[in-house]
Image (cartoon, grey):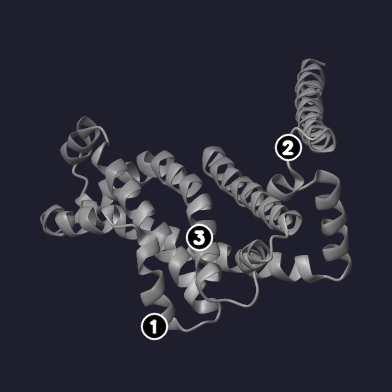
Amino acid sequence: MTMLKTRSFFGSVWLKILLAQIGLTVAFFGAWELAIRTGLLKVYLYGLPSGIFIKFIEQIGDLSLLKHTWITALESALGFFIGSFLGSLIGLSLWLTPTFAKVLRPFIVAINGLPKIALAPLIIVWFGLGIESKVAIAAIICFIVSLVTAYSGAQQVDQDLIRLMRSLGATRMTSFRKVIIPSTIPWIVSGLRLNVGFALIGAVVGEYIAAKEGLGYLVYYAGTIYDLNTVWVGLFSMMALALILDYGVTLIEKRFRWN
């Protein structure tokens, strides 16, 4: 009985939140539409919500939006997973070799401080104009973020736990598996959440520079011909992708929490 009440409570709360989110969205677009219709805002500067919706339906109908979205989603997802996995793995592994980590530290700091987008022209030269270059840009950005986050998390683990493990006869590798990795999971997940946006940035910037498909190309091309409604369609599609990727990170976080 108590469990049913709990589920009912959370269900009603979730429904209220969802309705509030829908209401806020409708109010935002309604105010935007009204401001354009009444002349408070210029349509050629801000676009028109009803026009955006029409463009969205048109591009869904001819499958062009689905094609562009799929390309960007694939580039972002591949870059996200490759960069996040390798960055987290190496960042954690540096705890096992503290001397080597100190040798690498200035290089990591320098690369982390470098605007990774500045590497985009080089990466496109190395990997070509295809999907590979966009995946590489996204992966490099995510790699650095995950490496720094995982390594910082490993350094913050309570040293008393490490000393306790050693007093019990545990090897450094055992302490790494039993203490360091579990304790660093929240840091890694935080890095994953950051990488959702960074993966999209990497893919979209690559499409801006050299591409014939993808949401970045769609937004860039529409901007050059002042088609602001299509620009907004591309931007809202990117936001939807970000929400989907973030939901994937939430599922990963829940999986670790249950385990």
Q: Mark 1: few, some, or many residues within 10 Å (few <14, many ≥20)?
A: few
Residue in view at x 55 percent, y 70 percent = 207
Q: Earlier in the sequence, mark 1 or mark 2?
A: 2
Query: Could you give the CA–CA distance between mark 1 and mark 3, rounded to whole angstroms?
Result: 20 Å
Q: Secondary structure at mark 3?
A: helix
Q: Which residue is mark 3?
A: 80
Q: Is residue 21 left or right of residue 110?
A: right
Query: Could you give the CA–CA distance between mark 1 and mark 2, rounded to whole angstroms?
Result: 45 Å
- Looking at the rendered structure, the kind of residue marked 1 is Trp
Q: Which residue is mark 2?
A: 41
- Looking at the rendered structure, the kind of residue marked 2 is Leu
For this rendering, which residue is in front, 202 or 210?
Answer: 210
Where, quadrant-wise, is the N terminus in this rendering?
top right
Residue 212 percent coordinates (x, y): 63, 78
For this rendering, which residue is in front, 70 or 120?
Answer: 120
Q: Which residue is mark 1?
A: 126
Q: Earlier in the sequence, mark 1 or mark 3?
A: 3
Q: Is residue 42 left or right of residue 113?
A: right
- Looking at the rendered structure, the kind of residue marked 3 is Phe
Q: Is residue 213 above or below residue 30?
A: below
Comparing labels 1 and 2, the label whose residue is closer to the camera: 2
Q: Earlier in the sequence, mark 2 or mark 3?
A: 2
Residue in view at x 69 percent, y 57 percent = 231
Query: Could you give the CA–CA distance between mark 2 and mark 3, rounded to whole angstroms?
Result: 38 Å
State yes or no: discs 1 and 3 in contact (Cβ < 8 Å): no
Q: Is residue 168 left or right of residue 213?
A: left
Q: Is residue 10 above or below residue 154?
A: above
